[in-house]
Amino acid sequence: MESFDGEMNGGLREVMHKEKKVLNRGFVELVEWMGGDEAVIRNARRCWRSASKGTESDRKLLKHLLLKGHKTPFEAMVFTFDIKCPLFVARQWFRHRMGSFNEESLRYCVAEREYFVPEGLPAKLRDEWREHQEETFTLYEQMISRHSLRREAARAILPIGIYTRFYWTVNGSSLMNFLLLRTSRQAQREIRAYARAILEIVSTVAPWSFSIFQEFVLKGGESGSHEEA
Amino acid sequence: MESFDGEMNGGLREVMHKEKKVLNRGFVELVEWMGGDEAVIRNARRCWRSASKGTESDRKLLKHLLLKGHKTPFEAMVFTFDIKCPLFVARQWFRHRMGSFNEESLRYCVAEREYFVPEGLPAKLRDEWREHQEETFTLYEQMISRHSLRREAARAILPIGIYTRFYWTVNGSSLMNFLLLRTSRQAQREIRAYARAILEIVSTVAPWSFSIFQEFVLKGGESGSHEEA
Amino acid sequence: MESFDGEMNGGLREVMHKEKKVLNRGFVELVEWMGGDEAVIRNARRCWRSASKGTESDRKLLKHLLLKGHKTPFEAMVFTFDIKCPLFVARQWFRHRMGSFNEESLRYCVAEREYFVPEGLPAKLRDEWREHQEETFTLYEQMISRHSLRREAARAILPIGIYTRFYWTVNGSSLMNFLLLRTSRQAQREIRAYARAILEIVSTVAPWSFSIFQEFVLKGGESGSHEEA
Amino acid sequence: MESFDGEMNGGLREVMHKEKKVLNRGFVELVEWMGGDEAVIRNARRCWRSASKGTESDRKLLKHLLLKGHKTPFEAMVFTFDIKCPLFVARQWFRHRMGSFNEESLRYCVAEREYFVPEGLPAKLRDEWREHQEETFTLYEQMISRHSLRREAARAILPIGIYTRFYWTVNGSSLMNFLLLRTSRQAQREIRAYARAILEIVSTVAPWSFSIFQEFVLKGGESGSHEEA
């Protein structure tokens, strides 16, 4: 099945180790992965003691797995992303329990002046927003430097829109669940932007799995996500 | 083993459905549970096809399980708590992936004016803190009511110290892991207050398991928790 | 919403602590539970800070949650079952990782002469099957008692159809996933018998959740389960 | 930190895609991995926004993480193994819920005549063991081919010592937990052989993490594992 390597290597050079910009200050970047389409097919075929049979039959198998909810083979592909996003987006992200997060901590680091500004605000409101946020950071910094308040307590005054950074390691099955819920029209606009960026990246890494996923699972985009917010 | 019911019922009436105050505006409350010491012992003894043998031998078994890291029997006891805490505490809490969280959402609800104020601030600083927070909430409310900004975006200006509420369902084994990390001296003071309150409550529900846990696992309190912050 | 208690108590007395027979020697028995419909509704409504609104609106909510895949609220109900089943059924069961198992161990206990006999075998074949199994157990017992082979090694000669016993603690969401895969026509006949027995029991405990689950999720029964076998 | 690549590449060529023999017919083979020491250090340092500082300080960090139970950074390294082992060993293995398994299924495949024979049996007993097992397989094959019994039911007569094959994908943290419990003197001799083989392999892939793990966590080897059997 030569197509795997042939197709992928070109695109992979484009997506690995490149920050893909999201929102006013954020990004996602693929830093590591293993598996891909080949591993999913190999693992699924273990069930019948069979090996990959070439293009068409493998594609059919992937479609069957995705439509019937056989998720285990997709756990054979794993990704690590470097992510920078507003804290309210990170909170939605961390609700997805199947995956691991390593995040910078404001117990140990001093927060940088980077915060979310909603798109589409009239100029006057945007200025008011920014001005208030700048004052907030000034107050925060004074609490720490001048009044020796613990960083971990001083952060309580910082806005929920502050940017944070974390590594996210997640397998293909859990990633699809994330994408299903977070590209949905019910999901918040801001996390949808991240979900779409990630979908683009992984579609380069495992093109078969994620094109079938998009066509047959995401399609209608009807699935909701009101609650984990 | 009559002691189970005899001992517990008195104390249980005290702890069920009562808000135990924590920090300036928070609380924890036990709303539901199943299992307890009896279930742990029953499940552990299944391994040898044996039944509870009475006080001393059962205590010894519990101690053996805790010291050797045999965690599965403790998954037979499960608790649901109602919790109100600052968002920065909730973020630490939600890092514990083995358990389930149902939280109120600021995508659908308007935030209430309840926020964390660090203890021990000099009066002048505390006033400055409060004043700035009140301004923040006023700006937030204007963004929503006057300028029709989406609630889910407007919340980005709210402080990380805002109070949130959630239900937490967790089994005994995962709870012990939470308590080990979050009562530790390395944990942040604020979440330690919650962890201690919960430890008190569950010590009434499953007195044997948690007294042995306190004596032999927590004791030194040396275990750290720098990272999940 | 008085219907909860009114409806349930009658039926519950029937299903708690009663062995429900399955296959030639097996059973399932509910030994403990918490939560139920009420807890699911309470947890789901936390999202909007709302309380139960009475019959119709609560039913609608449960249906919405189930159809949209919002699983977290169902994690507020938890069950512990006592189960006796052939080992090849237990192997399929233990593939469901979200739940906890406490099983008797043939490292410590000597196996009892209880084994699966396929239904519908002609009498002559059934006799041959039984005779061979009895010889197997005799050989097993001799290996242990006469030749001092370790129990844990001697069991290697025992049949995969031997009966085992375990406690299973599982929340409502994981249980539904189990039921979806194991009541399916693709599932093995023997585990389907267990899945149906469990579905009957929990339908008494949480009648709303599981009747809606049956009507709208299970219905077609098309979902497959070929792989975890 | 050139040592990573320098040290590893040589040894890796030795361990990747090579069957390492275990017991009379089994093996383990590393088929894929990502991460390694570098990823663990990178993820752990994210907490403080710091980068790798070179040999000594990184080693110290790894030791600190392992001793304090900070497991998340080790989830950044992931392995896939191909494993062939007796079914009673697989049953112990599958109790480790944090990882994914893709196993061949005797619902779809006909079992091969490969079964465990305990080491150290006197010749006469070993012959008796083998003879009985061969008869068992003959009966199994007749049930399927001559009497058209479903494969999935016929397997009930096969021995628990039959060999099975599966892929196992597991992260570094869960792997360490497996190794801690399964290299222990309380673990069954047969699974200990597999655990040691895997420890050797991963010690080549992530030499720092696993040498510190061996020295400071495994050392005494006192931790027990009686129950998951």
Image: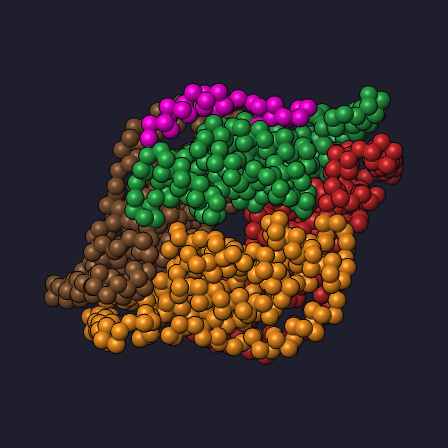
Chain colours: A green, B red, C orange, D brown
The residues colored magenta run A1-28
Q: How many marks?
A: 0
Residue C34 seen in render: no
Left or right of B117: which side holds C180?
Answer: left
Is D176 above or below relative to C165?
Answer: above
Tell me the quarter of the picture where residue B217 sits: bottom right
Q: Quadrant of the C terminus of chain B?
A: top right
Magenta stretch encompasses residue C21: no
Is C15 above or below relative to C54?
Answer: below
Q: Depth check: give the residue in front, C143 or C138.
A: C138
Q: Quadrant of the N terminus of chain B?
A: bottom right
At which x and y percent is residue D68? 52, 44
Left or right of B219: which side holds D114?
Answer: left
At which x and y percent is residue D121? 17, 63
At which x and y percent is residue C23? 40, 72
Q: Depth check: give the residue in front, A128 or B204.
A: A128
